[in-house]
Amino acid sequence: QSVLTQPPSLSGAPGQRVTIFCTGSSSNIGAGHDVHWFQQLPGAAPKLLINRYINRPSGVPDRFSGSKSGTSASLVITGLQAEDEAVYHCQSYDNRLSGVIFGGGTKLTVL
Amino acid sequence: QVQLVQSGSELKKPGASVKVSCKASGYRFTTYGINWVRQAPGQGLEWMGWINTNTGNPAYAQGFTGRFVFSLDTSVSTAFLQITSLKTEDTAVYYCAILHGTYNDYLGQGTLVTVSA
């Protein structure tokens, strides 16, 4: 059971908008710790997609955006494309565990 | 740019040991700690702990004490993960990672460790 909760799977048609939520608690997101998002393409290592809730590293399309609300974070993908099919992981830090935490990952399928 | 290159896949028998290497390049090695992350087949990412590249002090997450050892060879900018008394449930991809909350956050390509009789 991951400390950060994500839906196991989501799907969307090309061109659609999808939102992936990452729900935490008062000991992690609610305590002010940043959330980062990683994209894991099939057969590859996870790669940084969004840094500190909203920041995109160079090369990440602006179709990807992030936000925070209370003890949750969200990743929004607009104009869904076939190459977005991947597993998306949120990551933060937890005061109670004194360490890095991940969500369980969300497998996004492009229909 | 930041790069972490890991050693190749390993096939081991239960009870054996394995040592995975992670060579850093593109930055000063002592700038970031090295984290270790496990991904069991079909599962999510699990943080195992990290090692301070300035002091060499390791910190292990719950569930990764005893059989797991993090170490460094700073002369060649390389971190190591050793797992002893391997069990079949240790079968997973192991990643070394920079998780510093910056744009340089990065995971190595992963090392598949398969434990099978």
Image (spheres, rainbow, N blue to C red):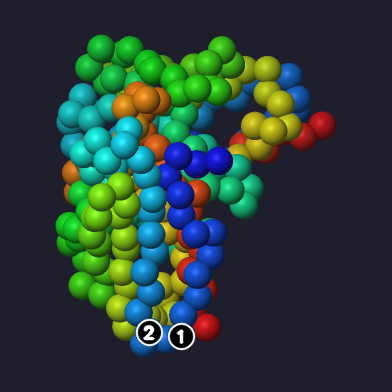
Instruction: Please tell me how crowded label 2 is: few (under 14), some (14-19), or many (20+) other residues with Cα within 10 Å.
Output: few
Q: Residues within 10 Å of mark 1 (few under 14, many from 20)?
A: some
Measured as percent of width and height from the top left, residue B85 is found at 68, 17
Measuring 50% from the left and 41% from the top, which residue is drawn there? A2
| Residue B40 visible in this rendered orientation of the protein | yes
Q: Can residue B111 be seen?
A: no
* Mark 2 chain: A
Quickly name the residue at label 1: A13
Using the image as rendered, state which of residue B115 and residue A99 is in the foreground. Answer: A99
Q: Position of residue A39 (x, y in %)?
A: 39, 59
| Chain that bears disc 1 | A
Residue placed furthest toward the right: B117
- Find residue B3 and report its horizontal and vertical position in percent: 30, 44
The answer to the question of whether label 2 and label 1 lie on touching residues, with beta carbons closer than 8 A, is: yes
Residue type of the residue flagged with mark 2: Gln
For the point 29% across and 42% down, which residue is it?
A29
Frontmost residue, A54 versus B83: A54
The amino acid type of the residue labelled 1 equals: Ala
Side of B35 where B90 appears, left or right: right
